[in-house]
Each structure stands twice: as structure tokens, then as C-alpha cells.
Amino acid sequence: MRRVAMQIMYDGTDFLGWQRQGSGRTVQEVIETMLSRLCGDRSITIVGAGRTDSGVHAYGQVAHADLGTRYDDDQLLKALQRMSPSDLVIANLSTVDDEFHARYSARRRSYRYRIIRKPDPFLARYAWYLPFELDVNTMNDVALYFRGTHDYTALSKHNPDTPDAVCEVYSAQWHDGGIHLDFHITANRFLYGMVRLLVGVQYDVGRGARGAEEVPEILKSKDRSRQSVAAPTTGLSLIHVDYENSAFQPLY
Amino acid sequence: MRRVAMQIMYDGTDFLGWQRQGSGRTVQEVIETMLSRLCGDRSITIVGAGRTDSGVHAYGQVAHADLGTRYDDDQLLKALQRMSPSDLVIANLSTVDDEFHARYSARRRSYRYRIIRKPDPFLARYAWYLPFELDVNTMNDVALYFRGTHDYTALSKHNPDTPDAVCEVYSAQWHDGGIHLDFHITANRFLYGMVRLLVGVQYDVGRGARGAEEVPEILKSKDRSRQSVAAPTTGLSLIHVDYENSAFQPLY
């Protein structure tokens, strides 16, 4: 047995999220099924860095698994790439130390939320189409409130498994690239629904429906009734997961 | 009644091609249904510049229709954009002269065929994934054979409606952009299956399965049994249709 780590890219549109469920196509289930076939049909469990929701995409998801197989890393990667459906790619795979844990060893996670202002059938699966004027400068002022260590109870969905809602946000900003308006955020951890709720409240400020000064008050209140509507999942992508000590180096 | 011309973009993956059929979702049927609703449920027929196959995409498809409606061009465009499904966008619309005909007035059509060499879940719907070494220089030598006026019987599918197979190809070349390897071709007309068969034979030359010098012989032979396998529809996009005298100006 050895532990391998993988970097995984997927178009989340046709997956019911990361986590294996009773039924339905999930990223975890598709990868576990492939690995089982490559390991003599033994049952395999993989652990992911983040449990992305239904419809959320990933460029740099990371997972680990303990495998008993004669294949070396390169053979395993090539075999997985041959078996993968077209909306899922194992981009990278390597044997790691037994102490490596895709979830607990992760130090930082980066997400991107993408908005488009012109309708585009080739971007519709990967962005939120908003044909409205948005005040991006003020949205960037709001993004500054998110930096640092805050309790994100008010801007997350209820999750009984995570009683502690304190996150350390290292960077949060909007980048207007013309075709794409992207919100980039990096933190030590993210709570359930958090990025989509942060985008939702910034969108409300950007279109003038709420004042920028409300945002720090909402955060302090820890009151979920003050949330804006969460932005839709289509625009959200897990871009990168950072590990300490070069334990595993994703390609992106 | 007035004649309007439209530029249409679509992700062809979930359409059974352009042309209305007895059943099944086609681009023509979706647009005709929207226009009928906007014109008091009268039956509307639209005429497209090119009948793209099932799975083929379009950035610059053009169609015309004769409409009886009080909406002006801008209101009509906005209404269509609100009604359109996310994989279809009416990018542009304007009233044109009654002599304008989306198919017969078109002077040049440009297609792009896209190949990717690395697997990518976000490009899989829009490209042909080929993880093989390809000799792009020799493929560009082959592309030169296609320029000028030739009978394309040998490199098209049989179509009883088009007995004449002579096409004038204005440009044909490969462009290697790193992530994308694109074949761009512009001609006065294209025959059924033609671009995918041109890409198929160039792929066979590029991977060393056929000699470049065979290609002009195949063309001259008018013998369909000498075709290579057609490249899959995923990689093909109708990029642009050119009209004389500025009759209608697509945005792209």
C-alpha cells in the first residue's frame, strides 16, 4: 500500500458535487470506481481537499488515496487519463508521504467566481451572466472587508459539522478582464456556501441595492437573516490548494 | 412585414444540428418558436446561412426571417435575448433589404476546427482531444493543396441535393497556439461533411499514416473510398459569414 495524491480538474455541470451519495454521479464516486478497477476491484476511498457543491467546477482539486497496485505513478496517471470521462481530468499524480492528507494538510484554498456581462453560449456553463451595470470599484472596497480573520457565520450556510466559523482570508479582490469579471479569494478554509454568499452581497452592493458599509455590520452580527441571495454555482471554481513543505505540488 | 437578419451563436453539443426535424431540439426550431411567440403565435420560418450538423458550434451563424411585429430591431433583440436558452445567443439583429437572403447572399463562410493536445474538461465540448505527436508543418503543406478552385467530391459526403462539388477555397491553414491547434478555412461554399473530412486526412498525414503527396491525388480522383475518417463534430465551429455590399454585418 502507498499513498498517492492527485490533482483533479472537472466541469462540475453534470456532477452532483464532489461527495459520494447514495445515488447520482459525483466526482468522488467516478474516481473511486476507476481506482477500484485498477486495483483488482478492491473498494477504494479517496479524500478530497474540498467538498465542492453540485455544479461547482475545479481546476486544482486535490485528493489522496491509499492504493495496493503494481502500477507506478506514471502508469497510474496514464491509465486514469484513458478511463476518465471527458468532463473530468486527473492532471497530476504522485506518491506522497503517509502523513500527507488532502484535507488536513491543506494550508490555503483559492476560489474564483466568474461573472460575464455579455451573453455567451460557450461561457454560460462556467459563469454567472449579469447584464447589469456593476460598480466594480465599490465591490473592491467591500472585498477589503473580507481580508483578515473574521467569523463568517453570517455569510455561510448552517453546517452542524463546523461549529467554529472563523476563517483567515489572505486575499480577496475583483479583477475586471473585460469579458470576465472575476472574484479571487484565498483563505485557510471556507465554510459551506461562503464564496457564493460573499459574491451575492457584493453583487447587491455593486448594483446599488445595499450600501458597502452594511457589509462589516452583517459580518459582526453573525445573523444569517441578513444574507443576500447566494450567487449561482455555475460561476464558482476551486482553483488551487496549497500544501506546506512541498508535500504535494499541484500543477496550477 | 419586414425582413430581419440575425447573428446567432450556439454551443452545438445539445442541439441536433441547425435544421428543423420531425422531433428533437434543433437551432432552427428553438429560434422559430421564440419568434412565433413574439409575433402573435404566427408560424415563422427562418433561413440560415449554413446547415450545421449535430454537435457543430457557431459563433457567426446568420439567418433571416420575414416578420410582422410592432417591435423595433432593438426591442426584438432584447426580447430574444431574454427568451433564449443559455446555449444559444442572438448576438445581433437588424432589418435588411427584402433582397437579402442569409444563404444565397452569403459570399464567404469561415470555419474553425480545434484540436487540443492536453486533456481539459473545460474544452472537451469544443475541441478534438488528440494526445499524439502531429507534424503541423506538413499539415500546413497539405492545407496549401486546398486553396483555389477544386472539385471536393472525394472529400465530402454524398448529398443528392448538391450535384456540383466545385468550391473556391480562399484560405486554409493551421495555427498552433500552444493550447489550441486550429485549422482555419474560408471558402465560397462548403459541402456536407467537408471540413471534418479535410481535417481527417490532414490528421492522418500529421501522424504519419498517409503521405502528404496523396492528398492532391485523392482530390483529383473524386473517389470517396479514399477518404480518411472524418474528425468528430465537437471541434468544428462556423465562425463567420461574409455578405457583399454591407447587406448585413455580423459582429464577428
Image: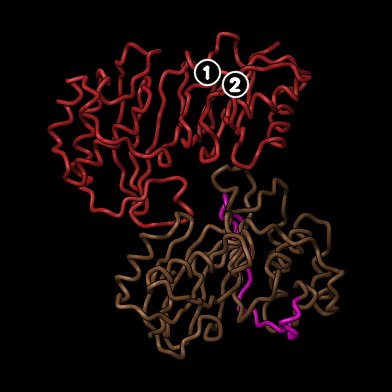
Chain colours: A brown, B red
What is the CA distance from the residue labelled 1 to the residue labelled 2?
7 Å
Query: Where A23 falls versus A171 (above or below)?
Result: above
Residues in magenta, as a range? A159-182
Residue at the image point whose x is 75% and y is 73% from the top = A156
Viewer-proximal residue, B85 or B103? B85
Give coordinates of residue A137: x percent, y percent. Answer: 69, 61
- Which chain letter goes with mark 1? B
Residue position marked by numbered label 2 in the rendering: B5
Contact (CB < 8 A) between labels 1 and 2? yes
Q: Amino acid at mark 2?
A: Ala
Q: Nearest the camera: B204 or A242?
A: B204
Residue B12 at x, y percent in the picture: 51, 37
Q: Is residue B28 rendered to the left or right of residue A217? A: left
User: Residue B84 lies in what quarter of the image?
Assistant: top right
- Mark 1 or mark 2: which comes first in sequence? 2
Identified at 71% across, 10% down, the residue is B1
Within 10 Å of disc 1 (Cα), the crowding (few <14, some 14-19, many 20+) is: many
Q: Depth check: A106 or A132 in front? A: A106
Numbered disc 2: secondary structure: strand
